Image: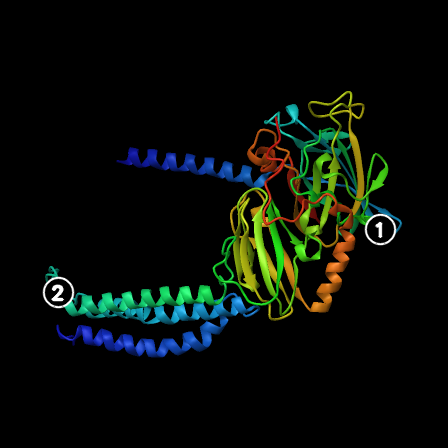
Amino acid sequence: MWSSRGHGARIAALTVIGTAIVLPLVVFVLGPNMPPGKGTTVASSQVTDNTVLLVVMTPFTVFILVYLVYAVVAFRAKPGESLVDGAPLRGHFRAQLAWLVSTTAAVLFLAIFGTTELLADNGAGGGSGPNPVTKPGGAVLPVQVIGQQWEFTYRYPTYGGVETATLVVPVGREIAFHVTSLDAIHSFWAYELGVKADANPGVDNVAYVKPEKVASFHIRCAELCGLWHGYMSDTGYVVSDATFASWIKARQRQFAPIMKYLPKYATSYTPDPPFRAG
Amino acid sequence: MRTKVAILAACVAVVGVLIGFYVTLLASGPTPYTVPAAQAAGSRTANLTLQTVAAVGELAPNENWVSYLVRERGVWHRSTVWTLPANALVHVTIYNFDGKSGLRNPFLAQARGIVGGRFAIDGKPVSLINPDDASHTFAIPALGVIVPIMGVGDNAPHQCDEAPCALSDAHETITFTFRTGQPGHYRWQCFVPCAAGFVYGFGGPMQTIGYMDGYVDVV
């Protein structure tokens, strides 16, 4: 049934056919449902990025699976066949070249694509450190995210530096999250916003995002930070401009008494007290 | 050969039993305290009485660790897992015998999530304290509850060094009420870096259930 020649051609043909079948499913069915959804420009870009990654890996995955199944079927021992050593392996220049060229091309493409996406999306929702290479144009609303064992709190420097226990941001406006910590290393992960930025003590880690629809989103710490790390989660809200304006006013009234004790807004804070003597 | 197999089987059995004991010990955790519920003025209520001490003493293996204690039928226990009634008003009294450590985040010195937005220190209603005067906090983040606990002054006479402390020792009395809401399993914790001798004050008793952290089971 199987001639000793033509294995490569058959595997290549099956790979092409398999890829042709799977690829549309990846692009039109799986891709649009990839995380984290399309709640923000950054999140939408991440869905696209994940889809592109899947598309690039599809032919390689199909090839490996085809090769595996083909080998099991074509090279299995027939009933009664004695156990013999396989044919000696020799280099196959064209096969090696094809593999090297295709995988190198894929990796280089992804490197260039990934770098472009990082720059085009002003960090793609990840923390870009205190001095991001690219910044969004126009007005940006800064919101400071303060990690501490074991809760995130939030300061709004353009609203008198008021601090809140709940994260609320307006829809349609560019937000700059300034992520920092007062103790251990945390990671601010606002899942549906497509934001995930490390919170390091003494560091201002900036992540940009532009919410595109009114919704709630999950917040959790993504860096193992101690006993209650698993409980360090919350719900944030993207609201209309009017709702945000009334909410922030209410918080300014509510937390007016404590404002005199808060340190002046800074991009990061030195943990104080550093420890308790004992 | 049979002897070797028997020895191996016995060893496996012994290790299995030891693992079973260990897992059971981990799963059982601290003994929970069910706070008695009562009916008053059409509402379910419960009274939770706590004390905070600088050193837990002989009540725990780590005698020098700071800790919360709960009063059950007049006796102080080291238990930080409590069962509270759902949709009830919980009246909390905390006797704090510990000194001032200071809050790392001053924002947490203003009370939230409690009935009326105010708590009382020795009977005087307030909504916040100076963050530097905080000794501990009582916080159930998922319920939005946080109350700062005023510390005992450095020069106060008759300071208590080790639990259980008596009300004749220097202390601050903190009282407040919060509503439990729907049934759930919540953690509670202290936000003051009060673990003496640990980096950033958040090791040891701050990372071990039974001292400055615990669970509230609302049922």
Tell me: residue A29, above or below residue B145: below
Label 2 marks a residue whose chain is A
- Disc 2 residue type? Glu
**Residue at left 60%, top 59%?**
A218
Category of crowding for the residue at label 1, using alpha-carbon neighbours closer than 10 angstroms: few (below 14), some (14–19), many (at least 20): few
**Residue at left 61%, top 37%?**
B206
Do we see residue B127 in this rendering? Answer: yes
Tell me: residue A44, above or below residue A82: below
**Residue at left 66%, top 32%?**
B67
The label shown at residue A81 is 2
Q: Would residue A201 be found to the left or right of residue B213 on screen?
A: left
In 3D space, how far apart are the residues under numbered discs 1 and 2 (Cα atoms)?
84 Å
Q: Would residue B90 be found to the left or right of residue B29 on screen?
A: right
The label shown at residue A44 is none
Viewer-closest of B179 and A107: A107
Frontmost of labels 1 and 2 is: 1
Label 1 marks a residue whose chain is B
The colour style of the image is rainbow
Q: Position of residue A223 (x, y in %)?
A: 51, 49
Q: How many marks?
A: 2
- Which residue is label 1 attached to? B43
Q: Position of residue B151 (x, y in %)?
A: 74, 32
Viewer-closest of A86 and B144: B144
Viewer-closest of B54 and A72: B54
Q: Position of residue B107 (x, y in %)?
A: 70, 46
Helix, strand or loop status at disc 2? loop
- Disc 1 residue type? Ser
Q: Position of residue B9 (x, y in %)?
A: 36, 37
